[in-house]
Amino acid sequence: QGLNGSSIAGLLQHGFVLLTGGRDSQGGPVVTLPSLQNRSDPSPDEVVTCLQYLIQIPSEETKRLGFSVVVDTRDGSWANLNMVMACLQKTVSSYVKQVLVVLHENDKRANQDRPSNSDPRYITVNQLFKYIDPKQLTYDLGGRMEYNHSIWLRTRLNYEQFLKDAQTTVEHLKIQEGEIQRSYNHPDPQASPLEALRKHRQFHEVIMTVPTEVIHQGQDVLKSLQENGFSGYSDNQGMIPTLDNLEAQKQVKRVLQYLTNRVDKLQEFLEDRDRSLNANMQYAEWKRNVKVVVDWVLGPGEKLLASQNDIGDSYEAAEELRKRHEEMEIKCTDTYGQYAELRHTVDDTVAAGLPIADDMKAERDYMDTVCRSFATRLERRRTLLITSVRFHRFAEELSACLDELLELFSSDVEADTVEAVEEAIKTLETKCDNCDRVAEQSLNDGQSLLDEMSRPIKNAFGKDISPDYSNQIKHVNKRLENLQERKMRCDELADVRKLKLQQLLQLRTCERDTDQAINWINELCDVMVTTHTDMGQSSDEVEALHDDHKKFEATALGTYEYGKQLLQAALVLRRSLRYDIEPNYDRAQRLEEAWRRFSKGT
């Protein structure tokens, strides 16, 4: 377009020349020079300028149909028709189809016959309807078309401004798209992912602000065209917008569609880039956290673990080391929690199908190797210390058991009855069984401890970092040997003690049975004295009583002989046990005394 409406808005506001949107009977645009209404005639330059601007509006195809120029001279306006014709000749001569000069009804020129192709044509308002339908004429020319010049001009200026801004926006997008390609093809190597994302979002905002505003501007213009189509351009009966209005709407829609498509495409690209940069930022943050975890494991974690090689030389020392190891494991809790979160992030990334998933999986595998190796060594260290605690606890328990047995073995056996001896035997067997159990557990835990210390230890990279446990192994072996030697001595002493208790049990049994035999003989004597007094009334009774007496004597004699055998066995046992034999002589005298008493009684 040659002229911009905004540059001549003041001139256009006067309404010297109008393009109402009406069409003649052949579809050509109607240009109206309305009544000046007592205003002074415009200058030729002003008319030319208005005409030059207005004839730009219809499409080339529409202009080829020819303009119908209507000049309203009924009130004396446009008296200088030669000036008007000169202006038309200068601007639209190739497009003018007819010039219709509307005269007052009483003007004689309206009835003069003129050639049909001669311009201008002088006609009345009623004759005007032969050339142009009343629907295409404004009210002041007797037509039925609504037209508000102020609204038309405002809408037209907004429309032109939108098209101008749209063109500027297209150029803006072209420049910015080139800038995007340059910045993305040659990113700043010094910029961090966070800086790149922040810069991209600022760039995004700068790029999209102008197109978004222009699109909103176009939507407002379209709305104005649609609304004003019923106020300034519509048919009074059918309320149909003018063709010029519809063409303007189509143009706005086409431009809006073009801008929207271009903006949507750019928006999609920028959003993809935003997601990519955001993923890169998250990956950089994730990678930094992975480095924190790995560096802690390979640094402070390794130092903590490497500084804990002792197993303790007693139960208290081993238990203290175990507690310190638990404290160290607690220190690792935060790192383990962060490690678990980092692995979960990888799973989410893989599930989302992000392009950085493969890189994250590779980093995760390396982190897994480092962390799991460290966790395995922590677990082995904990197992080693627990085994050490158990070994030293059972070793000390066994030592206490052996001390208790040795104390028992060094004491004299004081058991004057069979029951007391049996209780002593039971106590000894219980203590020996307990020592056997503790000794077996000590041996097993000691061997487990030795096996654990003999296993090689490798770090995450396969390097052998087995601690030097030679002193600890020597300590455990020495402790086991010492306990085994003491256990063997105690076993020997226990066997001697058991033999002695068995002999003592036999002694107390013999002495108990001897005392019982003496009591029986005395009881038999008492029975004989009190009951064997009947001499019998006949020879048969005498014979029967004699037989009973013989049996009675035989029983007493058997008891006496049994008592002597028991005393003989008791004498042997006392001598074997190195006990005083005087109690044995006392029982022998009591046995003899009971037998003499029984013999005298018979």
Image (cartoon, helix red, strand yellow):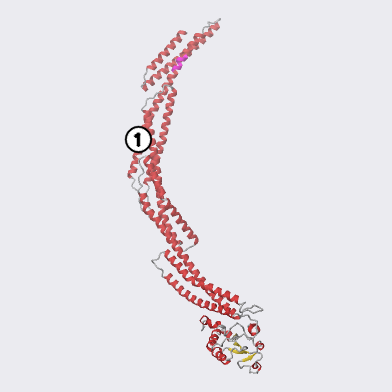
Q: Residue at x 43, y 67 (%)?
A: 199
Report helix, strand or loop for mark 1: helix
Give the answer, above or below, for where 290 lies relative to 390. Answer: below
| Quadrant of the rendered image containing residue 415 | top left
Q: Can I make out residue 93 in this image?
A: no
Residue nearer the viewer, 445 or 297 = 297
Magenta residue check for 517: yes
Q: Nearer the viewer, residue 442 or 254?
A: 254
Q: Position of residue 226 (x, y in %)?
A: 60, 75
Q: Which residue is mark 1?
A: 485
Provide the residue span drawn in magenta.
514-520
Q: Position of residue 61 (x, y in %)?
A: 58, 84
Amino acid type at circle 1 is Glu
Q: Where residue 192 sits in the image (x, y, percent)?
A: 40, 64
445 falls in the magenta region: no
Q: Give residue 475's quadrant in the image.
A: top left
Considering every residue shown, the one lying at the far front of the view is 38
Task: Name the spot of residue 434 as percent of width and height, x first.
Answer: 42, 33
Name the residue: 37% across, 45% down: 453
Q: Main secondary structure of the magenta part?
A: helix
Neighbourhood count class around disc 1 (C-alpha, 10 Å): few under 14, some 14–19, many 20 upward = few
Left or right side of 266 for 467: left
Q: Nearer the viewer, residue 578 or 92?
A: 92
Spot the residue most to the top.
537
Image height of 489 relative to 462, above or below: above
Q: How many marks?
A: 1
| Closer-to-camera residue (289/583) | 289
Instruction: Judge whether residue 318 can be spotted in this image.
Output: yes
Image: 485 above or below 179: above
Left or right: 63 as drawn, with respect to 567? right
